[in-house]
Amino acid sequence: MTTTVLENLQFRLASRPVGPAKASDWQQMTQVVPAINDGDIIIKTLYLSLDPAMRGWMNDGKSYIRPVAIGEVMRAAGIGLVVASKSPKFAVGDHVSGALGVQQYWSGAADDKAGAFIKVDAGLAPLPTYLNVLGMPGLTAYFGLLEVGQPKAGETVVVSGAAGAVGMTVGQVAKQLGCRVVGIAGGKDKCDFVVDQLGFDACIDYKAGSVKDGLKQHCPQGVDVYFDNVGGDILDAVLTRINKKARIVICGAISQYNNTTPVKGPANYLSLLVNRARMEGIVVFDYADRFHLGIKAMGQWLQEGKMKNKVDIVQGLENFPQSLAMLFEGKNFGKLVLQVADE
Amino acid sequence: MTTTVLENLQFRLASRPVGPAKASDWQQMTQVVPAINDGDIIIKTLYLSLDPAMRGWMNDGKSYIRPVAIGEVMRAAGIGLVVASKSPKFAVGDHVSGALGVQQYWSGAADDKAGAFIKVDAGLAPLPTYLNVLGMPGLTAYFGLLEVGQPKAGETVVVSGAAGAVGMTVGQVAKQLGCRVVGIAGGKDKCDFVVDQLGFDACIDYKAGSVKDGLKQHCPQGVDVYFDNVGGDILDAVLTRINKKARIVICGAISQYNNTTPVKGPANYLSLLVNRARMEGIVVFDYADRFHLGIKAMGQWLQEGKMKNKVDIVQGLENFPQSLAMLFEGKNFGKLVLQVADE
């Protein structure tokens, strides 16, 4: 290995945002990647996953994962290429998935717990797929739907954020199970996509009309499972249409993440009482010991053409702040990925 | 049987209340009890159960039970004495429990489905007990806690409305299971009662200070099961203290029943996500085929002195409207029962 000086552009958290993240909440800096010790590797970031959950990680306070500290490199999942290795675990040229952070290079111990790096097979699927259907969003959808939503064939499954990374997987997995699947998304293009390309039975455009009316029309048998990625008024609308013993999977609440006022709680939550229904949260890390089963099942559906994968790729690490903002403005169409480098 | 003319004072629903029920929402009228046919019985009302759920039955709209119609006798559970019978099912002198309605006499078919009359044993427990621990409130507590809350020995169970009919049973059953039990109630007398008389480990007086601070102090290991009878700010406070995989039983929301503004949804519901926790509704009628098991278990605890029963008895059917209002003002202390007649 020749010694090359690697310049590493990083985005660090400069301050905790109030409302949407602003440019001044980020600190851009460039560091030189240090020489590595035994057991260490250097990973070149190829793709970074941009996820709604990242907004939550920027807040202080108890959550399912510790907040990103002020001055710390912003946490992000990514796919990278091992470019230096003093570890038997990875070889130069391996493709890996893990918590690379918003930077050009990650370096440290190959068995770093926070990094949680695993090899991915670039031959099985295009690399960004490992940030989507075969990555955290896909696994969140898979285990959230199966373990918490517990849909049965013939039941009606509704999913919000239907054209997003999690939503598109929820709907497609539910179709594999024989459910009626109704998406909720913003805009005709997204709705057409999930129906025409992904095979959802219907999609309600929340920008074009009343979600409640859409649910009446497209869920004539009521709603048995609702997979919620958005919270707010849409959650409240679905609560009015649930069936007895319905299951609501609380996966996220993107409508509320940038609030400067308190979160809007679901005013119709007493529908849970009337319908003996359940609302339950899901965090994907709880299923880590079974990730390989989800990847295997969905990998096969992808290869057989029974499932599709849509990625919205933005170029250039320097565009990280405005790319992240796209999520909260509903501007991405499919799983949002930032391409940081070519191989 | 000698023929006696029985005058029957009734309270009928005159109009659907906006906010708390007013005097003008009731119509008092006196009818003569008609002669009965084969298969019929006449029941003299002795005790009526006054329950928060009654406010919900006065509203129009889909719920777990049909609304009381305008002009109909107000629905109420009660204990009565069979005073005339042309049915082999009941004999004169039997004590029965069922939906007698807010009136002095019920008459009709002994096997009336809405009435759902069953015999009760006046020798086993005082009659009002069958409207409390051995009645719907007690069974709601028993099945809601065991089936939905699923507490394990050593876990912390919190219950609101702790001195009320459901709450006092929840706490006492949870103590039998070996849980740490913390009540939430309004006022020192109620709090002292549930701790000193019922054996709760602690009780938070929501009128005297911050519920959140009380939870911090009295639930050092967090909250595993929360049995909610009140909703509103107290539900939100508990949501900030729940443990991973906590279960929240939604039994009622008395703080919200008289609202003229929309229900206050739980702003902290995303704690369900962070903690992979669950919020689930309970309706007691779902467990009807196992009521006898609950009555047997709790009847034995009562007889052994392991459980106590507190009833707050108000006299006189004519006092029904103001007695019902006591529930929503937190003025009752123990299960509120209206004594309509002596035997």
Image (cartoon, coloured by chain):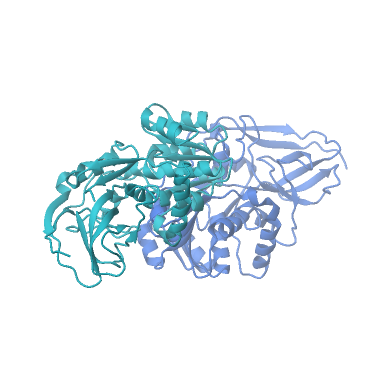
Chain colours: A blue, B cyan
For the image shown, how many numbered marks are present on the structure? 0
At 47% from the left and 38% from the top, the residue drawn is B238
- Seen from this angle, which residue lies furthest front? B1
> Do we see residue A160 in this rendering?
no
Q: Which x, y percent locates residue A24?
A: 54, 31
Q: Position of residue A326 (x, y in %)?
A: 52, 47
Looking at the figure, which quarter contains the N terminus of chain B? bottom left
Compared with residue B305, is residue A288 higher up or lower down, i.e. above or below? below
Judge whether B291 appears above or below B237 on screen. Answer: below
**Nearer to the camera, B11 or A219:** B11
Report if residue A69 is visible in the image: yes
At 30% from the left and 70% from the top, the residue drawn is B88
Q: Is residue B88 left or right of residue A154?
A: left
Q: Residue furthest top?
A: B208
Task: Give the left or right position of residue A193, taking residue B1 as reference.
Answer: right
Identify the image quadrant of residue A120: bottom right
Q: Quadrant location of residue B192? A: top left
What is the residue that sits farthest to the right in this orientation? A1
Residue B65 in the image, given as x and y percentages of width and height: 32, 59
Q: Residue furthest bottom?
A: B38
Which one is in front, B47 or A171? B47
Q: Is residue B301 left or right of residue B79?
A: right
For this rendering, which residue is in front, A139 or B285? Answer: B285
Q: Which residue lies at the image location 64% right of the left edge and 40% below the top edge?
A: A75
Q: Position of residue A325 (x, y in %)?
A: 52, 43
Residue drawn at (21%, 41%) of the image: B322
